[in-house]
Image (cartoon, rainbow, N blue to C red):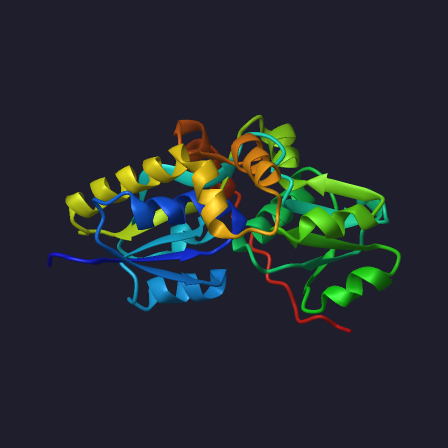
């Protein structure tokens, strides 16, 4: 069945500014852009309201009749700055980790690193109240994700960048989010999406100016061009296979209060 207007789900975050700009402005892609939270984005795709979506890499193995598409992702080949574990306790002494669930891939990556790099077995809880950052107990750590990291992480003595930790552990880059489409989505839609994403990445500064981000344009540009690696290459595919093969599954409990 032909999809005349592609329904594309994505999150409206700093990292995705170039992608959104490209989809809106490149001109060859006829698309309905569905912007929402990460959880809603995944729900839109799994419930059939979107044909294509930018999804956490950790969920890809569980998707039915889907495939990764395009040469683009939200990735990092070194420090990413916006996915960190922050604590006043050295990592070897961390007993509880409270996770910001904005990135499912980051939560699972933290689980991988806890087991394979930090050699700890903490209790995992959802971080539902960011006021808790100001009253952490000894042994507590916080997985923080997104723009909020720029302010929040500076409060803590120990800050570990998860992309950098993965690179140290595996010598590989990482892809936090990848583009996924239903099998059978028309080739012309995928080709048009590829062109749109290329256009967006090539016009990152214009995308920043249009986005209305609270960061100064030069700060946002430095982050998007120096910390984010948008190219989904063979190394990142290999990294994801290694990540998936580990078979770890972190299921954070509700915050105990």
Residue under the image location 62 percent in, 51 percent down: 147
Observer-nearest residue: 251 or 82? 82
Q: Is 14 placed left or right of 19 in the picture?
A: right
Residue under the image location 63 percent in, 63 percent down: 252
The picture places residue 46, in percent across and down from the top left corner, at 35, 64
The picture places residue 210, in percent across and down from the top left corner, at 45, 48
Q: Is 240 placed left or right of 137 in the picture?
A: left
Q: Is 146 placed left or right of 243 in the picture?
A: right
| Residue 114 can be seen in this image | yes
Residue under the image location 30 percent in, 62 percent down: 50
Residue most extreme to the right: 138
Q: Is 180 placed left or right of 106 in the picture?
A: left
Observer-nearest residue: 34 or 25? 25
The answer to whether residue 166 is above or below residue 86 is above
- Which image quadrant is residue 91 in? top right
Residue under the image location 76 percent in, 42 percent down: 159
């Amino acid at each position: 069945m032909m999809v005349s207007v592609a329904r594309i789900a994505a999150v409206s975050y700093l990292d995705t500014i170039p992608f959104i700009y490209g989809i809106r402005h490149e001109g060859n892609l006829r698309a309905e852009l569905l912007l929402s939270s990460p959880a809603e984005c995944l729900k839109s795709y799994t419930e059939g309201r979107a044909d294509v979506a930018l999804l956490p890499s950790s969920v890809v193995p569980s998707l039915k009749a889907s495939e990764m598409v395009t040469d683009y992702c939200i990735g990092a080949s070194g420090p990413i700055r916006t996915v960190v574990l922050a604590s006043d306790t050295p990592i070897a002494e961390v007993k509880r980790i409270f996770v910001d669930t904005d990135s499912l891939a980051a939560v699972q990556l933290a689980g991988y690193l806890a087991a394979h790099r930090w050699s700890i077995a903490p209790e995992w809880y959802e971080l539902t109240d960011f006021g808790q950052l100001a009253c952490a107990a000894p042994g507590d750590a916080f997985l923080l994700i997104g723009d909020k990291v720029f302010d929040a992480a500076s409060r803590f003595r120990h800050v570990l960048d998860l992309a950098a930790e993965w690179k140290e552990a595996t010598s590989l880059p990482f892809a936090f989010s990848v583009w996924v489409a239903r099998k059978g989505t028309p080739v012309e839609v995928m080709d048009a999406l590829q062109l749109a994403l290329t256009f967006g990445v090539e016009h990152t500064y214009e995308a920043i100016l249009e986005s209305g981000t609270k960061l100064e344009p030069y700060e946002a540009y430095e982050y998007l061009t120096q910390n984010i690696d948008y190219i989904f290459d063979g190394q990142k595919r290999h990294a994801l296979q290694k990540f998936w093969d580990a078979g770890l599954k972190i299921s954070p409990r509700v915050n105990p209060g």
